[in-house]
Amino acid sequence: MDSQILNTEIRTLADRAEITDLFDRYLRSLDDREFDESWAASFFTEEASTATPAGHVRGRNAVLENVRTALRLFNRTVHFGSNYVIEVDGDRATLRGNQLSTHVLAGQGGLFLSGGRTDNELVRTADGWRLHRADLNITWTQGNPPVLPPELIGPK
């Protein structure tokens, strides 16, 4: 095998490992709930967009505020990701996978479960891979979802 081809394959494997690690750390961080500007910068590009049941937002600061507001609805959460399909094309990549989330509702107690597909676009930055677009499409739920506050409803 040509050494240039081997180097390209090794780089692709390393990129896929870095992207998997980034996304797993992101899901774990949602449960750790330590959200500040450095948290947002460690996962998202400046122009990042997200589309989730908590709204559609654009810009890293808007993503940060959306996550803070949405997760206040829950006493605790546990987010799992699996079955990642990652495609790398130079300094851009996509990650598609499954997501299962368990939510303990704030105030009223009880559980709200959701499962769905996550579709993401990433870019390689000077600081490593970052999410540029992160979409969560819920395909099923169990339990009663929380009532969304006004700031999570309506256009963003």
Image: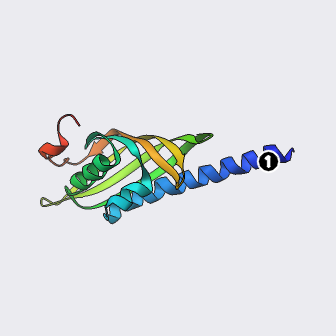
The residue tagged 1 is 6
- Residue situated in front as seen by the camera: 62 or 80: 62
**Point 21% across, 53% down: residue:** 69
**Point 31% across, 61% down: residue:** 35
- The C terminus lies in which quarter of the figure? top left
- Residue situated in front as seen by the camera: 4 or 152: 4
Residue 104 left/right relative to 60: left
Residue 41 left/right relative to 17: left
Q: Where is residue 112 in the image (x, y as percent from the top left)?
A: 25, 52
Outermost right residue: 1
**Point 48% across, 43% down: residue:** 97
Which image quarter: residue 18? bottom right
- Residue situated in front as seen by the camera: 124 or 126: 126
Q: What element carries label 1?
A: helix
Mark 1 burial class by Cα count in 10 Å: few <14, some 14-19, many 20+:
few
**Point 72% across, 51% down: residue:** 10
- The N terminus lies in which quarter of the figure? top right
- Residue situated in front as seen by the camera: 139 or 153: 153
How many labels sit on residues?
Answer: 1
Amino acid type for the residue under numbered disc 1 = Leu
Residue 20 left/right relative to 47: right
Residue 148 left/right relative to 117: left
